Amino acid sequence: MAFDFDELAREDARGRLGEWAGAPLHFTTDYYTPPELDAAYERWCFLNNSFDAIRRSHMWHRFSWGAEEEVGFETHRIAMFSADLGPERGSEGPGGVPHLAVCEPCQWYAIGSSENEAVEAWRDHAVPGWRELPVIPAQIRVRNEKGLTGLARTWIEVNYAPQMRVPGAPIITEREPTGTRHVPGRSPWGGYDLSSTAVSGAGSSEETVDIDCEPIEAGSPARTDTAIGL
Ligand SMILES: [Zn+2]
């Protein structure tokens, strides 16, 4: 006779759901630390099976791991999550794929309707004045197979102030005609390579989706139970 011990453990956990004291096991717009969000998503997957969990749970899950999470900028750190609020077949949902940036040391967070929007909100929080950084023109080839080119390094040395050539500091590059994503870990100091669309006002409208929660929500932690899409 064979027992499915995993299933027994799941049954046991389902019976004690009321004892769960972590982040909500559904979408939330409240502040939780990155480890709390990780634990909640893992818990949901354990209870409900991880197949198609992103779509079925609507919960925050890791979106990208960048060096900023370790290096940060000064005392700031960024952890990126996204959630799929698309409605399940036959049921209503707000739709959209919001992105969440969390600065754990500050207990700060922002929710954007796109990855770029969340990243830019974090940068406003962590690196004031970043929008005034010199934009590396498209004529300068920034990267090759080996990483940053010598030409780009020299250009940055000349044009970036010393206080912006520190661990975690970003660069801004002009990219034509496509490639508007802000790419983590790509500056010479482990910071973001930001697309100039962030400062030119062109935006990333083609990536932006409307969601039925505040497009940008930033500030101090507040915990009230909010469920969207369930
Ligand atoms: Zn911070």
Image (cartoon, rainbow, N blue to C red):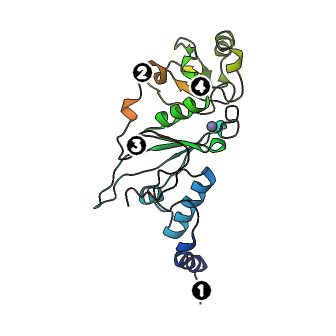
- On the image, numbered disc 2 is attached to which residue? 201
Q: Is residue 200 left or right of residue 13?
A: left
Residue 20 visible from this viewpoint: yes
Gap between marks 3 and 2, in whole Å? 21 Å
Q: Nearer the viewer, mark 3 or mark 2?
A: 3
- On the image, numbered disc 3 is attached to which residue? 214
Q: Is mark 4 within 8 Å of ligand 1?
A: no
Q: Secondary structure at mark 2?
A: loop
Q: Nearer the viewer, mark 4 or mark 2?
A: 4
Q: Secondary structure at mark 3?
A: loop
Q: Foreground: 2 or 45?
A: 45
Q: Amino acid at mark 2?
A: Gly
Q: Position of residue 204 (x, y in %)?
A: 41, 29
How many circles with numbers are drawn on the protein? 4
Q: Secondary structure at mark 4?
A: loop
- The disc at residue 2 is 1
Q: Dot 1, crowdedness within 10 Å: few (<14), some or many (≥20)?
A: few
Q: Nearer the viewer, mark 1 or mark 2?
A: 2
Q: Position of residue 104 (x, y in %)?
A: 63, 45
Tell me which corner region of the image, top left, top right, bottom left or bottom right, holds residue 40. Answer: bottom right
12 is higher (above) or lower (below) than 168: below
Q: Is mark 1 within 8 Å of ligand 1?
A: no
> Disc 4 vs disc 1: Cβ atoms closer than 8 Å?
no
Ligand 1 is found in which quarter of the picture?
top right
Q: Dot 3, crowdedness within 10 Å: few (<14), some or many (≥20)?
A: few
Gap between marks 4 and 3, in whole Å? 23 Å
Gap between marks 1 and 3, in whole Å? 50 Å
Q: Is residue 73 left or right of residue 113?
A: right
Label whose residue precedes the other's in the sequence (4 or 3): 4
Q: Amino acid at mark 4?
A: Pro
